[in-house]
Image: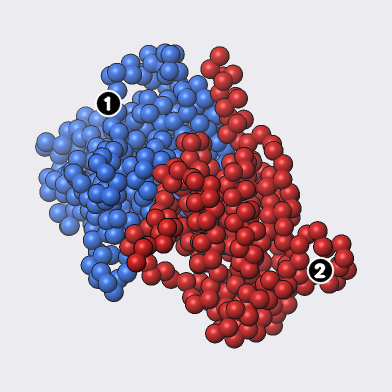
């Protein structure tokens, strides 16, 4: 542990703890949570770690309390995070909608799980993007290993700060509750992005005017900028819009808060591809399904099936350019998911009929085995 | 013409306001401005929070840092803001629907923690913005848009609720008590810990018409009703319980200096860092 309470080096660590250390490395100094299995180890470790690194932790009365206090802390200048699981994520939707609309950077960790047996699932994959009312965008990353749990937490904060937007990190229950090898680099070797601060006299500051990359500069409470943040449609100064006086106001607002993300999709897209060059069948996966998918593709290759592997780390916004390229290259795309078939529809949408997109659904709390994916690949390549 | 000296407290370009003629929100806004001015607060360090509803819109007109527009979540914002930057003065201006219907949990929990914030709850006894529906503050038997046969539910005594939950300064006035209201708001802002000021206010459009049967064009009658129907806490012993039911009891109900949430954090943090 260094003087500021941060740790580095090689560890054998729980996924949920890796997320906490990733947040600390990214500069998180406020955490609010509400206990829920299988995210509770994040809340527990934060309660010990935040005071050690000069941050503050609070256990709130519910998930709404957690997300809204995180928004408050971020407005006051802190990098802030909360963590929850599926059912708890429902409650946070309202806050995510607000954070996106008034452009508050924050990170929400979702550890998706089934009810009753708390098994991993990917059935939240749409709700992390589409849950709140109104037009908005979120960025969502999915971890598929302990190392990624750490690395992507840092990345999540960097995206949140860069785009002034809520960012969701998904760590499925089997990552969160697994222990594994984790390398934490020295502090000065971790890339950390901070929000662009407001400068100049307060009377000239437009807190919601799109700046570089479409993202406005952001002041913190108490700096003298006296910003009005309202969930209602607002102009560049933050004043509530009167649609009669400013008929284009709504469109300008929603184009800005959605466009800054969607126009930068390629920049936000994180993915990994293998064996695609001569492939005529691709497996597109995300999260823990990716490990089975890779194993299945390697075995398929040994059976002379021309299989390719695509792992999505960024699921929202949808990495459309990548998926379109894959669809143009191959005949068929198999999408294994731990749900009844959800993200597969996004792959289908982007493919525009260029490839046959086949769902491989399973929602019994287990990931697909490599054999199950391979079996389907054999069937489709015959 | 010289501008009014308190104009500097108002945000530029947000008028005209959205309140109905005769509404009490403008008065509460005024009392808050007078309190701030008399305390000579550093306006750069003030954060005003309002949720959703007529009363919650008051902060929108103020020239400070403001968050507005999500129903009932003001005290959750306040918690994050205070913990992240204890230098800031956080004042919540909320309504009965916002604070003690949808937001009750955050409200009682923040009071329990003795979070160092001031809550000015403007209580008009009804949901105004949505069209006059019954609220947890609507008196038993009142006819409203959602209680056409009369409300079946008891109303909250908000000051008792706040005190029981752990608030350390509790006071109630009406919009017809400007001087006392300003004094209590000042006291609340200066108080260390969770301070709660209930401002019983008039809603001529709904509560006045539906419950009090005061014509909408006569808000003065409503104000007089508030004044004449109020009794200071000191005089309550002269009335029977039955007579008291019809009255608005006003005054300072509770005041205590207790360790605040921030003070507890600061003490713990010193120990952790040693």
Of residues B4 and A344, which is closer to you in this image? B4
Chain letter behind tag 1 = A
Q: Where is residue B187 in the image (x, y as percent from the top left)?
A: 62, 48
Q: Position of residue A258 (x, y in %)?
A: 26, 54
Residue B212 higher or lower than A221, as above or below: below
Q: In which quarter of the image is the N terminus of chain A?
A: top left
Q: Can residue A358 be seen in this view?
A: no
Under tag 2, what secondary structure? helix
The residue where tag 2 is placed is B244
Compared across the picture, whether B172 is left or right of B116 comes to right
Of residues B253 and A267, which is closer to you in this image? B253
Image coloring type: by chain
Res A212 quadrant in image: top left
Which residue: 53% across, 42% down?
B79
Which residue: 17% across, 57% down?
A353
Q: Can residue A153 be seen in this view?
A: yes
The colour one sees for chain B in the rendered image is red
Of residues A104 and B34, which is closer to you in this image? B34
- Near mark 2 (Cα within 10 A), the count class, few <14, some 14-19 or many ≥20, is some
Under tag 1, what secondary structure? loop
Q: Output the letter for the chain in blue.
A: A
Q: Where is residue B191 in the image (x, y as percent from the top left)?
A: 62, 43
Residue A60 higher or lower than A303, as above or below: below
Chain letter behind tag 2 = B
The residue where tag 1 is placed is A191
- Near mark 1 (Cα within 10 A), the count class, few <14, some 14-19 or many ≥20, is few
Res A306 quadrant in image: top left
How far separated are the C-alphas under marks 1 and 2? 66 Å
Which residue: 55% across, 69% down?
B24
């Amino acid at each position: 542990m260094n003087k500021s309470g941060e740790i580095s080096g090689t560890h054998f660590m729980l996924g949920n703890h890796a997320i906490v250390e990733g947040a600390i490395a990214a500069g998180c100094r406020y955490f609010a949570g509400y206990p829920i299995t299988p995210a509770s180890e994040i809340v527990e470790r934060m309660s010990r770690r935040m005071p050690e690194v000069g941050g503050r932790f609070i256990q709130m009365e519910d998930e709404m309390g957690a997300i809204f206090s995180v928004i408050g802390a971020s407005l006051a200048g802190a990098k802030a995070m909360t963590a929850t699981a599926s059912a708890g994520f429902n409650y946070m939707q309202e806050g995510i909608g607000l954070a996106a609309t008034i452009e508050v950077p924050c990170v929400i960790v979702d550890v998706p799980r089934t009810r009753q047996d708390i098994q991993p699932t990917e059935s939240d994959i749409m709700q992390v993007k589409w849950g709140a009312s109104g037009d908005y965008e979120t960025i969502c990353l999915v971890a598929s290993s302990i190392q990624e749990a750490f690395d992507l937490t840092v990345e999540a904060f960097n995206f949140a700060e860069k785009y002034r937007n809520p960012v969701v990190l998904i760590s499925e229950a089997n990552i969160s509750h697994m222990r594994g090898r984790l390398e934490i680099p020295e502090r000065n070797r971790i890339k950390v992005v901070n929000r662009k601060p407001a400068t100049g006299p307060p009377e000239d500051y437009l807190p919601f005017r799109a700046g570089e990359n479409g993202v406005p500069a952001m002041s913190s409470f108490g700096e003298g900028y006296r910003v009005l943040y309202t969930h209602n449609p607002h102009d560049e100064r933050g004043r509530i819009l009167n649609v009669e006086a400013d008929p284009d106001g709504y469109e300008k607002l929603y184009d800005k808060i959605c466009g800054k993300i969607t126009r930068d999709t390629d920049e936000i897209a994180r993915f990994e591809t293998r064996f695609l060059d001569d492939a005529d069948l691709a497996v597109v996966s995300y999260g823990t399904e990716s490990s089975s998918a890779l194993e299945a593709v390697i075995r398929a290759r040994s059976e002379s099936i021309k299989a390719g592997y695509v792992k999505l780390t960024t699921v929202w916004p949808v990495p459309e350019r990548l998926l379109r390229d894959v669809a143009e290259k191959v005949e068929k795309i198999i999408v294994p998911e731990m749900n009844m078939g959800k993200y597969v529809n996004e792959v289908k949408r982007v493919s525009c009929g260029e490839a046959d997109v086949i769902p491989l659904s399973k929602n019994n709390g287990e990931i697909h085995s490599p054999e199950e994916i391979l079996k389907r690949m054999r069937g489709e390549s015959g | 013409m010289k501008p009014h000296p308190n104009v500097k407290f108002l945000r530029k370009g947000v008028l005209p306001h959205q309140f109905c003629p005769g509404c009490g929100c403008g008065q509460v806004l005024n009392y808050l401005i007078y309190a701030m001015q008399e305390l000579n607060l550093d306006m750069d360090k003030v954060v005003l929070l309002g949720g959703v509803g007529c009363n919650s819109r008051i902060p929108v007109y103020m020239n400070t840092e403001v968050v507005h527009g999500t129903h009932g979540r003001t005290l959750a914002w306040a918690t994050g803001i205070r913990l992240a930057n204890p230098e800031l003065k956080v004042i919540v201006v909320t309504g009965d629907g916002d604070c003690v219907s949808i937001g009750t949990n955050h409200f009682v929990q923040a009071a329990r923690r003795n979070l160092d914030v001031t809550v000015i709850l403007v209580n008009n006894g009804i949901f105004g913005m949505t069209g006059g529906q019954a609220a947890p503050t609507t008196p038993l038997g009142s006819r409203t848009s959602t209680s056409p046969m009369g409300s079946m539910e008891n109303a909250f005594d908000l000051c008792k609720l706040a005190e029981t939950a752990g608030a350390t300064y509790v006071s109630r006035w009406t919009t017809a008590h400007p001087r006392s209201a300003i004094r209590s708001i000042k006291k609340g802002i200066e108080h260390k810990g969770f301070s709660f000021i209930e401002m019983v206010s008039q809603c001529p459009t709904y509560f006045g018409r539906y419950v009090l049967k005061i014509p909408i064009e006569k808000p003065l009658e409503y104000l007089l009703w508030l004044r004449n129907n109020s009794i200071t806490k000191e005089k309550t012993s002269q009335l029977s319980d039955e007579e008291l039911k019809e009255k608005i009891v006003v005054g300072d109900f509770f005041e205590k200096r207790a360790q605040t949430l921030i003070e507890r954090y600061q003490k713990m943090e010193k120990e952790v860092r040693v």
